[in-house]
Image: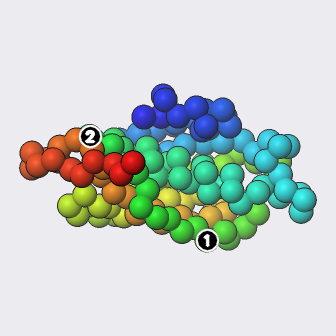
Amino acid sequence: MFAADAASRGLGIDLVEHTPGTAVVRMRVTASMVNGHGIAHGGYVFLLADTAFACACNGEGPVTVAAGADIDFVAPAREGDVLTATAVERVRYGRSGVYDVTVLRDGSVIAEFRGRSRRVGGRGADGTRAEEPQR
């Protein structure tokens, strides 16, 4: 999935580590990502966390998308900072799942993200067909 993610790759996001249910991604904050306060725009921090979440929940099979997500910004990031987002699966149930993502700068937490996933295609581990995406 990450290989086809032009948005994340275009922003310089690197997939550092990936195992079923987990992912680590990294991004350097560039001048074009900084808002009028001189700090990284929250949308870019969210995008980094969302990319880690997407990689973690798409590691084992059918297409899985975000059903919802929340983020808490704890500290700012600035131009030149390297941010690392680590996603961990907390629970999967039926076609749904819950994932936590921690975004760090130099080992300090700058954001906590919780994503809720929904499998939309393919067959599950039990062989039953998942719902198709709505058009």
Residue 120 lies, in percent from the top left, at 30, 49
Label ID, residue 72: 1
Q: Residue furthest top?
A: 3
- Left or right of 117? Residue 29 is right
Residue 47 lies, in percent from the top left, at 61, 51
At horizontal 39% and vertical 48% (from top left) the residue drawn is 135
Residue 87 visible in the displayed image: yes
| Chosen colour scheme | rainbow
Tell me how far mark 1 sits from mark 2, CA to CA.
29 Å
Q: Earlier in the sequence, mark 1 or mark 2?
A: 2
Residue 16 lies, in percent from the top left, at 51, 37
At horizontal 75% and vertical 45% (from top left) the residue drawn is 29
Which residue is at the front of the view, 116 or 131? 131
Q: What amino acid is found at the position of numbered circle 1 in the picture?
A: Asp
- Does 59 appear above or below 117? above
Q: Residue furthest front?
A: 135
- Does 39 appear above or below 125? below
Q: Look at mark 2 in the image and give the residue it sits on.
A: 61
* Corner quadrant of residue 123: top left
**Neighbours of disc 2 within 10 Å: few (<14), some (14-19), many (20+):** some
**Neighbours of disc 1 within 10 Å: few (<14), some (14-19), many (20+):** few
Residue 22 visible in the displayed image: no
- Left or right of 68? Residue 31 is right
- Residue contact at pointers 1 and 2, CB within 8 angstroms: no
Label ID, residue 105: none
- Left or right of 7? Residue 29 is right
At horizontal 67% and vertical 70% (from top left) the residue drawn is 74
